[in-house]
Amino acid sequence: MNAETLGFSPALLETEFKTVAIDSREVKAGDVFFALSQPEYKNNCFNGDFADSTQFVASALEKGALCAVVRPDRYEEHKSDLESFRDKLLLVDDCILALQNLAHGVYLEWNKPIVAVTGSAGKTTAKELTAHVLRASGKSVLSNIKNYNNGLGQPLTVMRLLSEGNFDIAVLEMGMSTPYNEIARLCRITPPDVAVELNVLPVHIEHLGTIERIQQAKAELVEGMKTGGTAVLNADDFRVLAMRELSKGKTITYGIENEADVMAKNIRFEHFGETKFDLQTPNGTAEVNFPLNGKHNIMNALAAAAVGLSFEMTVAEIAEALKTVEPPPQRGEILRFAKGFTVINDSYNSNPDALISMVKTLVEGGAEAKRKIVVAGEMRELGEDAATIHQKTGKEIAAMGIDALYGVEGFAKNLLEGAEDLGFNNVTFYENSAVAGEKFVDEVQTGDLILVKGSRGVRTEKVIEKLLEKFELAKD
């Protein structure tokens, strides 16, 4: 970590550790505590104001942390509290960079394959599907919990290589939301052996300005892959396919619309929560009985299948693995209620393409539903054209054959205006998710099929929470 000391204990220098902590409330005996402060967050592309956790170093050490990593200037500011702990302090210029450097060292000692996944939408689901497929081959697979996909989540995930057993492969989601080379930084911690590019969409355009800049930012994954590695590219997204020129090794393409190495053919939506398709690969074809709906989920499955092929799995093994996948929480999670209605909980995040895709999923899989209802939260980080984008998306949704549209917060009002412009008048606006949760529970009827989706900051999961409070889930 390029750390300096103030008379570090010689005994501590010889002490092995397996776990790190960045929250003093979660410190356990034997941890190394990293005291993060505002300058580190700013240097590493985190927006917002953060507390200076140097103030918690003493309590972390008293709780049993082996030592603490601190900025020299912060040590001087807190010297009266920390001087008695001089022999347990490591001084670095940037605590987040130090954690990243430490994680890189752990990765180098581990020295096994990294699969990295990025894209504007679907990263977490694709990462989970990929890890699931690889585990089916008998591999022990490390993957990010939740969406630990940034400059802190990534090194914290990699540090689990020390504490959680002998992993064979790591499948890591890599995210970005600023123009400051976030993915390139993550690739320096763990250079990918397999780089998976899902899509390039106008997400975070508020921060990056144009979709071309988003493309450049996402392409950092392929640029950062190992020489001789494999790039897995979406052939149905021309911006992703253009990254083929950046590949430093083999390329595997996947798609539905355009010719690709790995394809889904003969797609059939049997009923909600079940899709069938033929998985076509250079090594043969197998039928997949896939428990998720929607083209976007099939694309995620194809990306996972391509990764499986890169690790020499057979098409039959991959097809068998895809039969048993489950959606991550709040990402296409299907909740069946005893009253006889069904909810698709896709509350984790939203953007125009993802919302349209999920509404299409609702309509295609909801032929037997009495009513097809969309509860859509405001979509964030769409820049100065946010109102227009919401209005256009509302028009598209209204034309798709739904029965009711509910908007939650902010620009969702423009979503409803777009639907009304097309003559669709069964619309309701809620000022926030708390209000939506209280009122929407009285709107639900037997036979309804309901999609709940919104950007993270809108917290549309509050609608789900209220439904679960009022209604019981159906027993399997």
Image (tube, grey):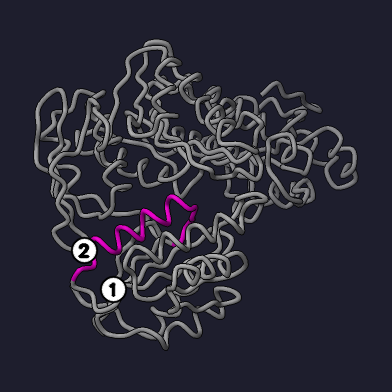
Q: On the image, which quarter does residue 264 sit in?
A: top left
Please report whichever mark, 2 or 1, sits nearer to the chain's N-terminal start.
2
Q: Residues within 10 Å of mark 1 (few under 14, many from 20)?
A: many
**How far apart in space, not on screen, are marks 2 and 1 (Cα)?**
9 Å
- Where 12 sits versus 290, above or below? above
Viewer-closest of 157 and 432:
432
Name the chief secondary structure element in magenta.
helix
Q: Residue at x 17, y 56 (%)?
A: 269
- Numbered mark located on residue 272 in the image: 2
Q: Residue at x 59, y 27 (%)?
A: 185
Q: Residue at x 42, y 52 (%)?
A: 354
- Where 102 sits versus 248, above or below? below
Viewer-closest of 476 and 444:
444
Residue 353 sits inside the magenta stretch? yes
The three-letter amino acid code for the residue at tag 1 is Thr
| 405 sits left or right of 253 in the view | right
Percent coordinates x, y for residue 273 in the rendering = 22, 60
Q: Residues within 10 Å of mark 2 (few under 14, many from 20)?
A: many
Percent coordinates x, y for residue 11 in the rendering = 65, 28
Name the residue that disc number 1 marks: 342
- Secondary element under disc 1, as helix, strand or loop, is strand
Q: On the image, which quarter does residue 450 sit in?
A: bottom left
Dots 2 and 1: beta carbons under 8 Å? yes
The three-letter amino acid code for the residue at tag 2 is Phe
Q: On the image, which quarter does residue 334 sit in?
A: bottom left
Percent coordinates x, y for residue 184 in the rendering = 57, 25
- Where 374 sits versus 173, above or below? below
Region in magenta: 347-367
- Where 428 sits versus 124, above or below? below
